[in-house]
Structures are given as structure tokens and as C-alpha cells.
């Protein structure tokens, strides 16, 4: 499973980094980014939850 952030719309609320720190972090530009190539299996549910919770829906998941 892959996850990525469309940074253009990120409002830096840090929700995704709190829900799934195994995949998301705040980058040097203060916007969220996915820092792993492939989501670890144990973090998949959290990554999905982060995508569902993002208030501006800019987290994308590819199963
Ligand atoms: S939840 Fe969405 S808006 Fe908030 S920091 Fe993450 S990607 Fe950005």
C-alpha cells in the first residue's frame, strides 16, 4: 500500500502526523509528507484513518 500527500492543499493541521506517525511527518516546508515508500503493514489502518480524517482530503492511498 502506498500513501502520499498532495501538499498544495495541506493546511498543516498535523492530524495525520498524530494519527499515523509511522508514515506522515511535517516536512521542512511545514507541510505534511509521507516519508516511507511503502506503508508498513502494521500502519495500514492508521494510514487509512489519517486519509479519512484529513480535513481537506489531500492524503491519497493506493491499496
Ligand atoms: S491531515 Fe491533511 S491537512 Fe492536516 S497536516 Fe495532514 S495532510 Fe495536511
Image (cartoon, grey):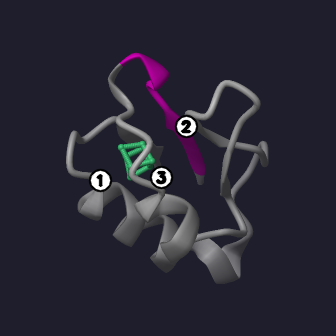
Q: Quadrant of residue 41?
A: bottom right
Q: Position of residue 21 (x, y in %)?
A: 66, 69
Camera-near label (1 vs 2) is 1
Q: Secondary structure at mark 3?
A: loop
Q: Position of residue 18 (x, y in %)?
A: 53, 72
Q: Position of residue 37 (x, y in %)?
A: 78, 42
Q: Which residues are magenta?
A: 2-8
Q: Which residue is mark 2?
A: 4
In percent of the image, x 63 and y 76: which residue is there?
43
Report whether 47 appears left or right of 36: left
For disc 1, does the CB lie below 8 Å from ligand 1? yes
Q: Can you say whether 17 is above or below 33 in the image?
A: below
Marker disc for residue 54: 1
As rendered, which of 35 and 10 lies closer to the eye? 10
In percent of the image, x 36 and y 71: which residue is there?
49
Q: Quadrant of residue 56?
A: top left
Q: Can you say whether 52 is above or below 63 in the image?
A: below
Q: Which residue is mark 3?
A: 63
Task: Count how many numbered circles sit on residues in the image.
Answer: 3
State the quadrant of the N terminus: bottom right
Report whether 33 appears left or right of 12: right
Amino acid at each position: 500500500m502506498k500513501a502520499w500527500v498532495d501538499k498544495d492543499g495541506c493546511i498543516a493541521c498535523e492530524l495525520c502526523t498524530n494519527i499515523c506517525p509511522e508514515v506522515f511527518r511535517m516536512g521542512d516546508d511545514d507541510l505534511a509528507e509521507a516519508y516511507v515508500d511503502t506503508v508498513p503493514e502494521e500502519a495500514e489502518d492508521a494510514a487509512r484513518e489519517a486519509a479519512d480524517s484529513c480535513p481537506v482530503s489531500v492524503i491519497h492511498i493506493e491499496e
